[in-house]
Image (cartoon, rainbow, N blue to C red):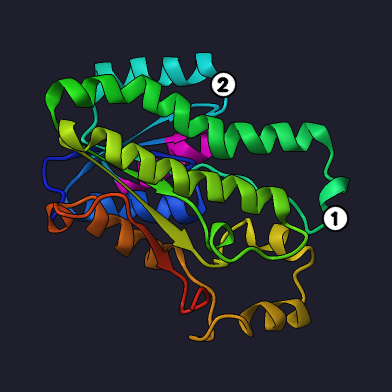
Amino acid sequence: MRLKDRTAVVTGAASGIGAGIADRFISEGARVVIADMNGDAAAALASRLGPQASSVVVDVGNLASVDAMAKHITALIGVPDILVNNAGIGHTPQPLEGLEPELFDRLFAVNMRSVYLTARAFIPGMRERKSGAILNIASTAGVSPRPNLTWYNASKGWVITATRSMAVELAKDGIRVNAINPVASETPLLSTFMGQDTPETRARFLSTIPLGRFATPTDMASAAAFLCSDDASMITGVALEVDGGRCI
């Protein structure tokens, strides 16, 4: 119960890593708002997780949508103790000059602009309260890039740098900011990164992970619960690799 009586917002939490984090936070005693563009899936997960969970629809790359989400959440639970910027998208492997501008713009909006928009929405209240924990979900792609995923790699490198800069600026206000860098995980994005989900492609990906398996939402949730709890009260500005050794 490391998060007992804490409130948390997790974006992109209707499935995958975000759903795993929401589930774990509730088991650790937190009240969690599941924020996702897929309102039906977010509501279904909140119903399954019980009275400590609620849901809200949001497009994390859209200013008006994030502001509306923040207004709803503040009325519901006040300024959250924990903010997890988990929402993210990828693109299929392709030459860097081949990505369509529309997809690049959406990648920028969801993976990068969202961190700015949620900071704009929630950090003023955290500063006033003099406490808060922010966790950004980056990727090993931001540390050890794979070819043909250049713009996704770059977006996650941006998240890592933003995390460190936020940590330095917000430390004086009692706000910790960390990130986790997942390796390829058993989530809906896995097939996107691989291009095609075949035994051969999986074997090729697994050959780069010393522990020999893909990550799971549970792996990420365990790291997230630690970094957002008082057990990590002296940790800020860290981008923790949860990667089975891939970045060694």
Crowdedness of circle 2 by 10 Å Cα count: few (<14), some, many (20+)?
Answer: some
Secondary structure type for disc 1: loop
Q: Is residue 36 above or below residue 224?
A: above
Percent x, y for residue 223?
Answer: 31, 62
> Is 48 included in the stretch rendered in magenta?
yes
Look at 49% across and 71% down and name the residue there. Answer: 215
N-term-proximal mark, 1 vs 2: 2
Q: Residue at x 73, y 66 (%)?
A: 194
Q: Amino acid at mark 2?
A: Asn
Q: Could you say where residue 69 lies in the image, as x and y percent from the top left?
A: 41, 21
Task: Measuring from the top left, give residue 130's x and y in whole percent.
Answer: 13, 29
Which mark, residue 222?
none
How far is mark 1 from mark 2, CA to CA?
28 Å
Residue at horizontal 52%, vertical 17%? 63
Give the structural element (helix, strand or loop) at label 2: loop
Q: Is residue 143 left or right of residue 135?
A: right
Q: Residues within 10 Å of mark 1 (few under 14, many from 20)?
A: few
User: Eyeballing the image, is 169 above or below 238?
Assistant: above
In this image, 94 relative to 181: left or right?
right
Residue at the spot x=34%, y=48% of the render?
22
Q: Which residues are magenta?
A: 35-49
> In the rendered view, would you say 55 is above or below 220?
above
- Residue on which the image places disc 1: 95
> Depth check: 183 or 1 in front?
183
Q: Quadrant of the N terminus?
A: bottom left
In the figure, residue 50 lies in which quadrant? top left
Residue 15 visible: yes
Identified by mark 1, the residue type is: Pro
Which residue is identified by label 2? 62
**Magenta highlight on residue 99:** no
